[in-house]
Image (tube, helix red, strand yellow):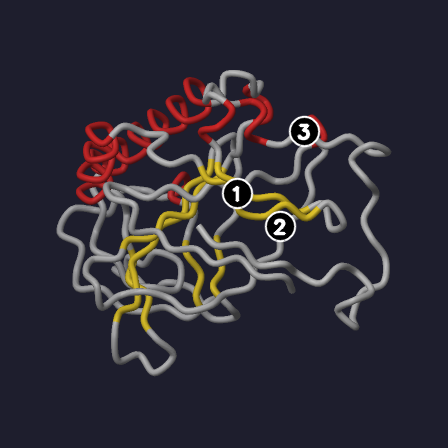
């Protein structure tokens, strides 16, 4: 693993102030709540000035369990395909899951919206061919759409199975792997991405994550790759 030094605040020509130190404003990191032995976590980002931290726990989920999760999600998740800006090729498939009564959708830019899978209803039997819908428009009679992207009709069985496997994953990851984290501090959402072959993928992206008041934690972002560690993340300073 290679490391790169980022410019400190004041050296980057943009920001000139550091965040409050962890000594003055304590911040417990997600790794501190895990069941892993200390050296299992590999540091990726250690930026005290910006209170930015990222760690990698290789093979936290067993190969057998990971394969099982992947196969079940592949079969029952309400996947929708995302295309490139020209609409000529599929970059990946995705779905959005929330718990705790959250009904918010997930947006990609200004145009693509993916409906919260927790609010989806099974399609009526014999649903006709699907028609794409623009955000903010109403469905005409007979249409069945998932957000602003076409999807195949969903059965109650597949939706129930999807929610069951997501609950199982949540319980294993945060119940078994992070036993020190109280249940009210567990993340309540997951954005799933499916890359069906080596031709699909995404380029560099910038994301903003809000700070939560739960246990003084930053919003925990926990990328997980099933069934093999194909996930390739490169973090950079904005």
Name the element at disc 1.
Answer: loop
Select label 3 or label 2 by which is in front.
3
- Percent of width and height locating residue 98: 46, 38
Is 99 displayed left or right of 67 in the figure? Answer: right
Q: Nearer the viewer, residue 138 or 39?
A: 39
Residue 111, given in percent of the width and then of the height, sits at 47, 71
Residue at the (21%, 55%) spot, across then down = 152
Q: In 3D space, how far apart are the residues under numbered discs 3 and 2 (Cα atoms)?
A: 17 Å
Instruction: Kindly identify the residue that appears in the image at 51 percent across and 68 percent down.
Output: 109
Q: Which residue is mark 3?
A: 28
Q: Residues within 10 Å of mark 3 (few under 14, many from 20)?
A: few
Location of mark 2 (residue): 209
Residue extending furthest toward the front = 2
Q: Residue at x 47, y 58 (%)?
A: 234
Residue 34 higher or lower than 45, as above or below = above
59 left or right of 9 in image: left
From this view, report whether residue 191 is shown above or below residue 157: below
Whichever of callouts 3 and 2 sits on the residue coming sooner in the sequence is 3
Quarter the C terminus occupies: bottom right
In the figure, residue 167 lies in which quadrant?
top left
Which percent across, then down, holds residue 64? 19, 28
Count of numbered tags: 3
Is the Cβ of the residue at disc 1 closer than 8 Å to that at disc 2?
Answer: yes
Circle 1 is placed at which residue position? 221
Judge the density around disc 2: few (<14), some (14-19), many (≥20) Cα neighbours within 10 Å: few
Q: Earlier in the sequence, mark 3 or mark 1?
A: 3
| Separation of residues labelled 1 and 2 (CA atoms) | 9 Å
Mark in the foreground, 3 or 1:
3
Which secondary structure, mark 3? loop
Q: Residue 28: image x %, image y %?
A: 67, 29
Q: What is the number of the mark on residue 144?
A: none
């Amino acid at each position: 693993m290679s490391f790169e030094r980022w410019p400190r605040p004041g050296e980057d020509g943009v920001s000139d102030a550091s965040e409050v130190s962890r000594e003055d404003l304590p911040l417990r990191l997600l790794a501190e709540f895990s069941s892993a032995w200390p050296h299992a976590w590999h540091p990726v980002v250690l930026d005290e000035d910006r209170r930015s931290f990222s760690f990698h726990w290789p093979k936290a989920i067993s190969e057998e369990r990971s394969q099982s999760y992947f196969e079940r999600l592949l079969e029952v998740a309400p996947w929708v395909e995302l295309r490139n800006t020209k609409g000529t090729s599929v970059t990946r498939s995705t779905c959005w899951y929330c718990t705790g009564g959250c009904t918010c959708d997930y947006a990609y830019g200004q145009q693509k919206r993916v409906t919260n899978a927790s609010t989806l209803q099974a399609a009526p039997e014999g649903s006709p061919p699907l028609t794409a819908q623009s955000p903010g428009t109403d469905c005409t009679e007979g249409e069945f759409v998932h957000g602003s992207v076409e999807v195949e009709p969903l059965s109650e069985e597949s939706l129930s199975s999807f929610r069951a496997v997501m609950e199982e994953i949540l319980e294993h990851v945060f119940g078994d792997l992070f036993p020190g984290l109280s249940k009210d501090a567990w993340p309540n959402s997951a954005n799933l991405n499916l890359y069906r072959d080596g031709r699909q993928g995404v380029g560099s992206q910038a994301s903003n994550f809000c700070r939560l008041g739960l246990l003084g934690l930053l919003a925990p972002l926990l990328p997980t790759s099933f069934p093999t560690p194909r996930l390739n993340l490169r973090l950079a300073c904005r």
